[in-house]
Image (cartoon, grey):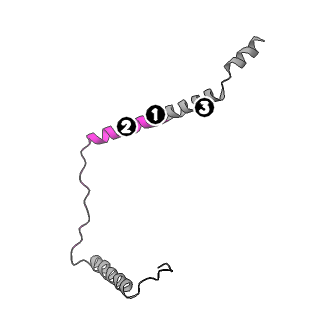
């Protein structure tokens, strides 16, 4: 009988179970965050070089192609506007 009473007294109510699950979840999140906080701290101390951006010259073929496509699209839209009822 005493074993049965102990077992019954250890059962948690649904609200207690929910609170326990929430607490376990919060502890797991804290454990996951601690290493990331440490990483951010360490990275803040390391000097970083600036990221070089690609240099595009005015006479580059890529820039000319982009400009030609833009002009073509602009011309198409100005000469053939999309209908209000149809999608372009």
Q: How many neighbours does mark 2 have within 10 angstroms: few (below 14), some (14-19), or many (20 or more)?
A: few
Quarter of the picture containing the N terminus is: top right
Q: Is residue 82 left or right of residue 45?
A: right
Q: Where is residue 7 in the image (x, y as percent from the top left)?
A: 72, 18
Left or right: 24 as drawn, with respect to 58: right
Which residue lies under the disc numbered 1? 30
Instruction: For label 1, count other residues whose C-alpha is less than 10 Å away and answer few (under 14), some (14-19) or many (20+).
Output: few
Q: Please, what secondary structure does the residue beneath circle 1 have?
A: helix
The residue identified by callout 2 is 37
Q: Name the residue under label 3.
A: 18
Quarter assignment of residue 47: top left
Is 52 within the magenta?
A: yes
Judged from this view, the residue extending furthest toward the right is 1
Q: In this view, does 84 lie to the left or right of 16?
A: left
Choose between 82 and 10: the one closer to the eye. Answer: 82
Element assignment for label 3? helix
Q: Give the range drawn in magenta.
A: 29-57
Q: Position of residue 20 (x, y in %)?
A: 58, 28
Q: Disc number at residue 12?
A: none
Q: Which residue is drawn at 26% across and 56% down?
A: 51
- Name the residue at 69% across, 17% down: 9
Q: Residue furthest left?
A: 58
82 sits to left or right of 42: right
Q: Which residue is drawn at 25% across and 59% down?
A: 52
Q: Which of 2 and 60 is in front in this view?
A: 2
């Amino acid at each position: 009988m005493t074993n049965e009473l102990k077992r019954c007294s250890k059962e948690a109510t649904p609200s207690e179970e929910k609170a326990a699950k929430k607490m376990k979840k919060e502890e797991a999140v804290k454990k996951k965050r601690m290493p990331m906080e440490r990483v951010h701290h360490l990275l803040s101390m390391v000097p970083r070089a600036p990221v070089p951006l690609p240099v595009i010259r005015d006479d580059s073929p890529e820039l000319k192609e982009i400009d030609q496509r833009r002009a073509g699209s602009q011309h198409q839209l100005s000469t053939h506007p999309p209908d209000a009822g149809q999608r372009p």
